[in-house]
């Protein structure tokens, strides 16, 4: 029988607490459990915590006093994200190798230069560094080398050469590209230059394929939905469905409504309010198709009243503030329908207040000061002390910024339409989409 030694937390306390070295109340649960190496009892320690950008996690550590066998791993306790995420990092120095990484069970890591890949579900999730992932791989390859040398000396010699290449990459001696692809959307690679854009790191959000949904255990609902109901019937109706709170995971209800934005198009607004912890969130989905042209909206903020303008930021929209050298890629913050002031507060909350690498042992004085300075500049913009340009770029053309002079032109706002590049069409899944003649090669049913 397992013995639980941790003190039971009050029912009002959150199950997952923010990770912090200063939180003395955040203690791991200790459970006596079976050692799978010597089959005697050891001790498992579980820490339920919450890391921003990675949602809730369970950190487990097992140690056996009888045989000294130990094992540590990390598991995601949060929900699967709406989109997958792909990080491509150009490693050029030892500093890049030391970047912290959150890698889930479903993430695939590749290094094209040496044709190396760690497939999904072959390693446990970990909060580590790129060096730590490579070191873990080297140790795993070295364990079976004595047996390989006895069975097949040629194979063992090739693996020795490959281990030497991995050690060169781990030491930062050889430049390489590290690609982490996670269909669950819960992996993360550190940006040491935050809030500025990292030129060496490319982050891409994408829609999962059917195979990736199956890997994550997400199954599509069989059967066709009733399509006879007209969309107009939903305009005055608020739909509700049950879900879990993204903050405390308690049961909650999400309200969904179809809204017509003046001088724009229809959008779907979803709002969740948790009665257990009081957390509120809203998300916006475009109600229309992808536009033929992308849209770039530039607003010069010259007066505090500009911050009251309505903003619709879709999931495919990236935003930037040139005066602060700040860029936020598409997919970050999700889809939102708010005001410019609310969006700036969300940016500050994401980059400064909830940045996991400014807390505990991960923080450095230079990085913390840089982010705090960025937060002060955001506050100055909100107070009307700094005049900046706010740029929304949506390759799908589904984002919107209110024109207070409508239907006349706004002298401080510029709206540009542009042709999408091949890479932008690839991100939207348009390059392989066939809309004409697709029925010609359909297999005949038996």
Image: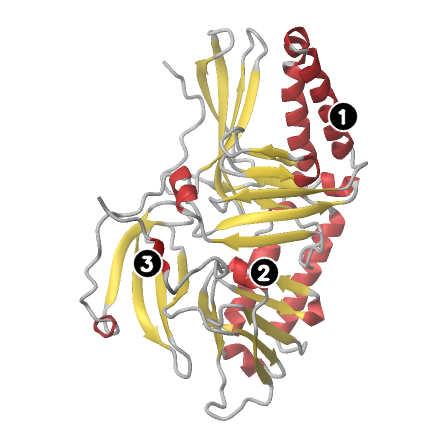
Do labels 3 and 2 touch, CB within 8 Å?
no
Q: Above or below — where is 65 with respect to 409?
A: above
Q: Residue 414 location in percent, x, y? A: 59, 83
Marks 3/2: CA distance?
27 Å
Q: Residue 161 location in percent, x, y? A: 75, 23
Q: Judge from the rendering whether residue 381 lies leftward or rightward of residue 225; answer left or right.
A: right
Q: What residue is shown with label 3?
A: 439
Q: What residue is shown with label 2?
A: 423
Q: Earlier in the sequence, mark 3 or mark 2?
A: 2
Q: Residue 20 location in percent, x, y? A: 58, 41
Residue shown at 73%/55% (left/top)?
369
User: Residue 389's quadrant in the figure?
Assistant: bottom right
Q: Quadrant of the N terminus?
A: top left
Q: What residue is shown with label 1?
A: 164
- 313 or 159: which is nearer to us? 159
Q: Residue 269 location in percent, x, y? A: 36, 66
Do labels 2 and 1 touch, CB within 8 Å?
no
SS label for mark 3? helix
């Amino acid at each position: 029988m397992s013995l639980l030694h941790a003190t039971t937390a009050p029912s009002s306390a959150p199950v997952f607490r923010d990770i912090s070295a200063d939180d003395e109340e955040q203690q791991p649960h200790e459970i006596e459990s079976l050692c799978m190496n010597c089959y005697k009892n050891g001790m498992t320690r579980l820490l339920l915590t919450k890391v921003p950008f990675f949602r809730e996690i369970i950190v487990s550590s097992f140690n056996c006093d009888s045989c000294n066998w130990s094992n540590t791993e990390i598991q995601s306790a949060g929900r699967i994200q709406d989109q997958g995420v792909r990080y491509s990092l150009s490693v050029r120095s030892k500093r890049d190798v030391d970047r912290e990484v959150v890698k889930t069970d479903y993430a695939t890591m590749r290094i094209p230069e040496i044709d190396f890949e760690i497939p999904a579900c072959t390693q446990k999730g970990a909060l580590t560094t790129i060096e730590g992932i490579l070191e873990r791989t080297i140790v795993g390859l070295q364990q079976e080398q004595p047996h390989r040398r006895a069975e097949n000396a040629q194979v063992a010699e090739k693996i020795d050469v490959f281990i030497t290449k991995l050690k060169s990459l781990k030491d930062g001696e050889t430049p390489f590209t590290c690609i982490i692809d996670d269909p669950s959307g819960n992996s993360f690679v550190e940006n040491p230059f935050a809030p500025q854009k990292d030129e060496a790191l490319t982050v891409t959000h994408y829609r999962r394929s059917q195979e990736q949904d199956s890997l994550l255990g997400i199954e599509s609902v069989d059967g066709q939905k009733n399509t006879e109901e007209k969309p107009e019937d939903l305009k005055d109706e608020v739909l509700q469905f049950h879900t879990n709170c993204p903050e405390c995971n308690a049961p909650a209800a999400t309200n969904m409504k179809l809204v017509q934005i003046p001088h724009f198009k229809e959008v779907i607004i979803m709002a969740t309010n948790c009665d257990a912890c009081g957390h509120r969130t809203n998300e916006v989905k475009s109600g229309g198709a992808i536009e033929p042209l992308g849209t770039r909206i530039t607003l010069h903020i010259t007066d505090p009243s500009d911050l009251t303008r309505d903003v619709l930021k879709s999931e495919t929209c990236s935003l930037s503030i040139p005066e602060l050298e700040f860029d936020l890629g598409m997919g970050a913050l999700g889809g939102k329908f708010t005001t410019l002031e609310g969006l700036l507060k969300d940016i500050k909350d994401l980059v400064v207040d909830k940045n996991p690498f400014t807390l505990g042992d991960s923080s450095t004085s230079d990085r913390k000061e840089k982010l705090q300075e960025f937060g002060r500049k955001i506050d100055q913009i909100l107070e009307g002390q700094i005049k900046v340009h706010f740029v929304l770029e949506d390759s799908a053309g589904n984002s919107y910024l209110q024109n207070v002079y409508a239907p006349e032109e706004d002298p401080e706002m510029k709206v540009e339409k542009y042709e999408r590049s091949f890479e932008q069409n690839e991100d939207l899944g348009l390059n392989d989409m066939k809309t004409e003649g697709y029925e010609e090669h359909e297999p005949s049913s038996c």
